[in-house]
Structures are given as structure tokens and as C-alpha cells.
Amino acid sequence: MATKKIDSSNFKSDVLESDKPVVVDFWAEWCGPCKMIAPSLEEISNEMDAVHIAKVNIDENPDIAAQFGVRSIPTLVMFKNGAPASVQVGAQSKSKLVDWIKNSAA
């Protein structure tokens, strides 16, 4: 499953009410490190059925970023059962992202 674009209209239904853990990637077009991890997140979304990968553009949705205290990007937040469970700040290799997701989703 490909990464899903999230905004204020679908955040509640697709993230907070999801039946699976959701990794939300807070990013922006101008963010170099965000662009570096985007292909890895796309691959992970196709390889890992246990979680959903969602993307929130902070320039288009500053209210969501502020709600979860996002101060730098990329910031990845693992949501489980409608609540933030783990946070990863900064660009990481695909293998480190996979490890973080597996540990956070467990």
C-alpha cells in the first residue's frame, strides 16, 4: 500500500481511528532530509502490511504539526490506538526506519 496524504479532513479517520499502527511522516517540500527518506518510506509502505504510512505536509497543515509538538522535520510519529506511541526525529537509513517501526508497532 502506498503512503497516504493526510490533512485535517482525514487525520481523525485515517490515523486516530485506524485499526493498525500508523507512522505519520511530518514533512515539507523544501526539506532535503524529508526528500531523502521519502523513497524508503514508500518502499516500507509496500513491504510492511502491519502498519500504514501517512504523510502530513506541515506547510499545508500547521495545526496538526503544532498539535503534536513537531518542531523539526522530518519527524515520524507512530500512532497506536489513536495516540502517539513513539517519535523519530531526523533522517535515518531504511534499515533503521524499519527497526524503529517494528519496535514501535510491537
Image: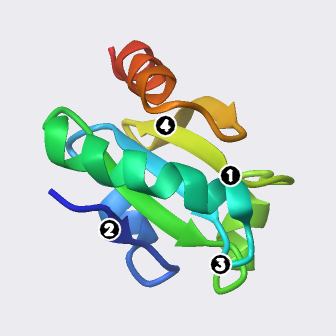
Q: In the rendered structure, which amino acid carries the disc numbered 3?
A: Glu
Contact flag, marks 2 and 3 (Cβ < 8 Å): no
Q: In the rendered structure, which amino acid carries the disc numbered 4?
A: Met
Mark closest to the chain's N terminus, 3 or 4: 3
Contact flag, marks 1 and 3 (Cβ < 8 Å): no
Q: Distance from label 1 to label 2 (Cα)? A: 16 Å
The residue where tag 3 is placed is 29
Q: Distance from label 1 to label 3 (Cα)? A: 11 Å
The residue where tag 4 is placed is 78
The residue located at (60%, 33%) in the rendering is 92
Locate residue 6 relative to residue 106 in the image: left or right. right
The residue located at (40%, 54%) in the rendering is 39
- 101, 90: nearer the viewer: 90
Q: In the rendered structure, which amino acid carries the disc numbered 1?
A: Pro
Q: Residue 63 carries which label?
A: none
Residue 91 lies, in percent from the top left, at 66, 40
The residue located at (43%, 73%) in the rendering is 6
Q: Residues within 10 Å of mark 4 (few under 14, many from 20)?
A: many
The residue where tag 1 is placed is 74
Of labels 1 and 2, the one closer to you: 1
Q: In the rendered structure, which amino acid carries the disc numbered 2?
A: Lys
Locate residue 29 relative to residue 104 in the image: left or right. right
Residue 84 lies, in percent from the top left, at 56, 37
The residue where tag 2 is placed is 4
- 82, 30: nearer the viewer: 30
